[in-house]
Each structure stands twice: as C-alpha cells, then as structure tokens.
Amino acid sequence: MNRYTRAFAGPLGAIALIVVLMSLAMIVAGTSPIDGFTALFVGALGGRNEIGETLVATTALLFPALGICLAFRAGLFNIGAEGQLLVGALCAGALGAALTVPGPLGIFLMLVAGAIGGGMWGAIAGWMKARFGANEIIATLMLNFVAAAFALELVSGPLRGPLAAGAETAWLEPKYWLPALLPGTRLSIALLFALALAVLLQWVLARTVFGYDLRASGEAPEAARRSGINLGRITWLALTLSGAIAGVGGATIVSGELHRFNTQLSPGYGFTAIAVALVGDLQPLWICLAAFGFGILESGGLAMQASAQVPKDAIHVIEGLIIFVLAARRYVATRVEGTLP
Amino acid sequence: MTELIVTLIALTLVKATPVIYAALGGVISERSGVINIGLEGMMAAGAFFAVVASFATHSPVLGLVAGIGTGAAFGYLLAFAATRFKVDQIVAGTGINLICAGGAAYGLVLLFNQPGASVQVASLGDKYWVLVVAAFVLAAALQWILYRTPWGLRIRASGENPSAVVSAGLDPLRLRTYAVIMSGALAGLGGAFLSIGELNLYSDGMTAGRGFIALAAVIFGRWHPLGATVACVVFGFFEALQYVLQGQIAWLPANAMQALPYIAALVALAGVTGRVRAPAADGVPF
C-alpha cells in the first residue's frame, strides 16, 4: 500500500466497520438496519435543528479529541479529558456567573478560565509523571473521579446558583453567551474556534520546533533525550496543553450551549474523544472529520433509540470495537509494508 | 467507638475484596508481559453477566461462574490481540473498557428494558464473606505459584525476557495468553462480587474506576500479589472511611469525600518513585 491508499484505507475502513457493527447492533435489538440507519440519519441530519445538534456534539467532541491527540503524539496516554473538560467548564461557569465586564471580554475571560482549569488538571498528571514517574494513564483517570467529586461538592454548596433546581451554577447573563452560528439552534461559534484550533495544532505539530520535540519524545524517547530534548518538560507541557484544550471545550459548552455549569454537562465526551482521536489517525485535520462522524452517532443515537428501539449505548460498544480493531490495523499495515518482522 | 472500629475494619475488607481480585489479575498479566488496562471493563462485564446469569438461573453461584467466564473471554480477546496481532496493549485495553461499559449499558436496555440499573436478582446474600476470605487466600496462593513453582517462573520469565523463554523451549506467547485469560477471569470475579456479592443488581458505572485503582495497587505493591493486596486494603480503608465518616460527622463535605480513595491511589502512585521496577518486557509485544 502506498501512502495515499493508506490515508484513505484508514478512515474508509473505519466507516465500513462502523456500518457493519451498527447493523449488527440493530439486528440484535430487533430492528432492520435500514430502519435503524434511517432513524439515525434523519435524527442527525434531517433538519436545521438536527444538523445544529449534530454540530454541537461535533464541537464538544472536537476539543477534547484535539487535546488527546496532542498528548498521544507526545507518547502520553491521556484518558482524563473527561475530568479536564469538567474542571474547565466549572471554572468558566463559576467565573461567568460572577463577572461584571463587557460581553466579549467576559467570554474571552471564561475561555481563559476554562483553559487554566483544564490545563491545571492536566498539569497535575504531567507533574506527577515528570517528577515522580507516576503512570499517566492511571493518574489522568483517577483525576476524572476527583474532578467529578469536587465539582459536585462545589456546585451543591458555595457555587450553587440561587435559583438552581439541582447542582448547577447561576445562569450566565446573555451577553456572556457565545454568539450563535446557526440561528435558531444551539450551535455557537465554538465550532469555528475548534476548527481553527485543529489547523493551529496541525501547524504546530508539523512545522514548529516544539511540535518536532513533541513527536520525537513520543516516537523515540531515547533518541529525543540524547539529542537534548528535556523529556520531563515535554511531558508536563504536553499534558498541561492537552488538558487546557479540553478545558476550553468545557468552557464553550457552558458559554455556548448550556449557559451555566451543571455536573451532567458531559455524557462521556472525554472518553468518546479517545475514539475520535484514534479514528482520526492522530492527525488534527482528519480528527475534524472523525468528530463530525461521531457527532452524527451521538445526536442521531438518541433518535435511533426513540424511533427504532436500538439502545443508544450500542454506539459506545462500537467505539470500543473500533479502537480495538484500529490497534490491530496498525500492525497489519506495518506488516504489509514489511517494516516489522 | 469499638463498634465503629469493627464496622470500619469489616467494611475495609469488603471494599478491598473486588479490587484485590482485579489487582491479582493485574499482577499475573503484567508479570507475563501484558499490561491489562482493560481490567476496569472486564470487571464491568463480569458484574453484568453475573447478574444476567443469576437472573436467568436464580443461582448466584452460577452468576459467579458467568462473571468469571465473561472476564476470561475478554481476557482472551486482549491476549489474542496482544500476542497474535501485537497491538498497542494500552489502546486495545482502552477499547475493551469502552466495549464492556457500553455493552453492559446496551444489555441493560435490551434484557431488562430499563436504562441505568438492572432488576434485583438472587445474590450471595450473607455468604459473600466466603469471597472476602478467598481473596486473601488466593493472594497467598498466587504469591506461592509465581515464586515457588516452575509455571510461575515461566510466567515471570515471559515478562522479563521472553527470548530466554524461547531458548528454554517454551512459548512465551502461549504463557502470556494463559496469564491474561486468568487476569480477565479474576477481574470478572471481582466484578461479580460487586454486583451479586455486595449488592444484588448491576448499575451503570458501578465499577467506578476500581480496575484502575487495581492497576495503581499493582504498581504500589511492586508487582507482587501480596504487596498489591496490602495496597488494595489501604484503598479499601479509604473507601470505607469515607462511608463511616459520612454517617458520623455531619460537617464533612460528603461529595468531596468520595474522592478519597482516588486521591489515595494518586498519592500511592506518586509515592513509589524510583523504588519500583516493572517487569522488563511489561507491555512490550513479542
């Protein structure tokens, strides 16, 4: 296979696999795949509102997926995007509820707060890894639970909005809402930020010294170390930036979509984003496409559950299977080229 | 006060038990050279199918068997991918976690027609203590097997230097496969303890990161069965402490206290620097 066929074999193979597996999940649930897919696509793309919701999910997945991509490229398996997103959203929500500045400045400050919150959460794992050699996979996952517990504590008590029914912060003033991109839907300009970030990340990874150091640390840590790259610095920087990107994503959910923070704001975006990043082959621009695909599954999944009686959770099984198969595919691909015995 | 301490000790052992099973699974898998990130998912799958089998047969013992079998099956899946396809074990394990958690949620709707939690099924009831004792016995047994039997030596050799195993005329991939299947079976048993031992139903997210806490225990216990067991008891203590304190001291922040076992795991993870060494070929495909 040459590099062009491989570039297409990945995403196309993944799509074919998704279709087959979804069909199986539908048949098991007693629905014909035709009905199931019809329900899925009508639910995801059948109208202005549906497209808006699909792109909302795309945006929510794209931020953490880009963060995960950055960490993975540095050889760091960040499975804590869920917690980083949550902390970012909490910081943005708490700040936004207290702000008294002009609108655009307020929105900017909220996004910064999201980046700082998420970045701090990623930095804890990065510091533990760089300073103590603590396994980042376990550390980032443990921090998800810590984030959820503290977020619940804070919004149940000190940060709880005066009129909130549950564990939620106060509503944001409308001037702190991200402007709508598709009027009449919940889609905000956060999607444009995410796409711009993808382009920026692609450029950083491919064209800057920092991106080179990052990739070198991921692909050949020993060689990187001997060529003078400070692996510890790359480790904590990569996990901090990774968390910051997920945290900005959390802030955009608060400012653009829900207009306040609540602890249920992410239905596992941080985990689905792992599948998004891997299906996108850890290339930021492919990840945009993958995020759209998974956005269709996320928003169409609810409709599929309602009208075709296929449990939405089938999608998560499929995400897992895809990750699993992609892991094997990489081996098969390298074997075809003869670079591995 | 005495009563409180007795409660705390008893609860510590109960909370430690499922994590011990998973951690023993983690030790044997990593000793053979395969990192089993999928412990969490294998626990969830074991917990779910234990409930399904108990629901279908009204026999909690068959439920346990189903839990063990399910875990073993997913263990085989990981082993197959790790030995035959030389996949990135971390990625494959993450895939297994998503498959199992999503699959259980899908199965809940499909079989019990209700999202979130299953119906109540026949549980082990007050006989669950047998599994608590068994966890510690098993830890001692595994310590003996790994360090005192030829098979244990071979497993450890597969994780330290698989080429040497080949030189001895044995197949490290086969040894790894056996080890990872056992690892899955143990995780499945730990999951079954959660669902039909401590409770009598499956609910989404009930494993709550215990598979990862088990992985932290493996590292903290320096890849020794008994060491990992001690670490699990420490984590179990913090989980139990959180429950006991909540009932006793009203001003404690109840929600934040739930983070206690995870923070303990984080501190343990950071606290063992430089003093531990993983098996040399841990996570390296052969």
Image (cartoon, helix red, strand yellow):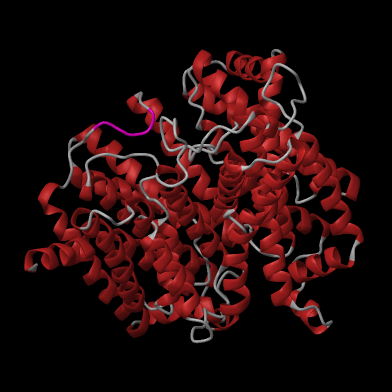
Please identify the dominant SS of the magenta region.
loop
Is B192 displayed left or right of A333 in the figure? left
Q: How many marks?
A: 0
- Does any portion of residue B94 appear in the rendered image? yes
Between residue B23 and residue A200, name the one nearer to us: A200
In the picture as drawn, the residue positioned furthest to the left comes out as B2
Between residue B103 and residue A99, name the one nearer to us: A99
Percent x, y of residue A94: 56, 45
Q: Which residues are magenta?
A: B115-119
Is A98 displayed left or right of B141 in the figure? right
Residue B280 belongs to magenta span: no
Percent x, y of residue A334: 78, 58
In the picture as drawn, the residue positioned furthest to the front comes out as A100
In the picture as drawn, the residue positioned furthest to the bottom comes out as B275
Percent x, y of residue A33: 59, 18
Between residue A261 and residue A222, name the one nearer to us: A261
Residue B118 belongs to magenta span: yes
Percent x, y of residue B280: 57, 80
Name the image quarter holding the N terminus of chain B: bottom left
Residue under the image location 40 percent in, 45 percent down: A157
Q: Is residue A156 above or below residue B12?
A: above
Is A190 displayed left or right of B200 in the figure? right
Name the image quarter holding the C terminus of chain B: bottom right
Is A217 displayed left or right of A27 in the figure? right
Question: In the picture, residue A268 is in which quadrant?
Answer: top right
- Does any portion of residue B169 appear in the rendered image? no
Residue under the image location 42 percent in, 76 percent down: B220
Residue under the image location 26 percent in, 39 percent down: B201
Question: In the picture, residue B186 is in which quadrant?
Answer: bottom left
Q: Is residue B11 above or below residue B163?
A: above
